Amino acid sequence: MSEQLTQEQQAEMEQARVEWVRTHYQKANEYLASKGIVPENVFVNDSRYLPPYFAVWKINNKQKQVFWVISGDLPTDHMPFSTAENAKEAVRAFSLNWQLKAQQIINAGINDKTKHDFAQLLISRAESLYQMYQDEKLWQAEPV
């Protein structure tokens, strides 16, 4: 009986993971569309998912331009594929980018709570991403 429960729990966990991946893939596509980039397809083997934290997608558009897109429990963002050779390096690049963006916001002078909160969010997520970038256990697993 307990083995059956474990199988059921595993099935539920896998279903939740699949749903999380689907939701954040849609979020990444909507984000790109809001930036005027019409996604065509995703390179599944080059993308990485770490539910519930983040997903890094390698996506190309109709013009065959390729982008890294990050979504999850952090700001959705994108960068050209040429910025990083793989998903792990893309995580590092997003982290460094967000640290720079946060510093630019701070240097420009924070005159409202929204900017302050956004800068703090960028700093927090950049630090977390960098820790995950450095954790080799996360990158040893098979793709996706």
Image (cartoon, grey):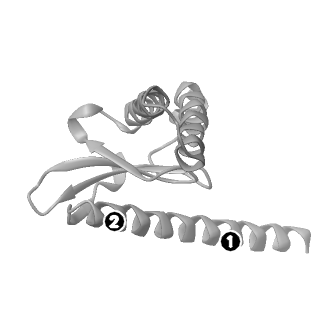
> Which residue position holds label 2?
29
> Residue 137 location in percent, x, y?
60, 31
Q: Residue at x 60, y 38 (%)?
A: 120
> Which residue position holds label 1?
11
Task: Determine which of the numbered discs, if any, sits on residue 66 in the image.
Answer: none
1 versus 104 height, above or below: below
98 versus 107 height, above or below: below
Q: Is residue 136 left or right of residue 3?
A: left
> Residue 78 location in percent, x, y?
33, 47
Q: Is residue 56 left or right of residue 67?
A: right
Residue in the foreground of this view, choosing between 142 and 58: 58
Q: Residue at x 29, y 42 (%)?
A: 79
Looking at numbered disc 1 in the image, what kind of residue is underneath it? Ala
Q: Residue at x 42, y 30 (%)?
A: 108
Q: Is residue 22 left or right of residue 138?
A: left
> Residue 95 location in percent, x, y?
47, 32
Whole-number angstrom distance, CA of label 2 to CA of label 1: 27 Å
> Residue 76 location in percent, x, y?
44, 53
Looking at numbered disc 2 in the image, what kind of residue is underneath it? Asn
The quadrant where residue 25 appears: bottom left
Q: Nearer the viewer, mark 2 or mark 1?
A: 2
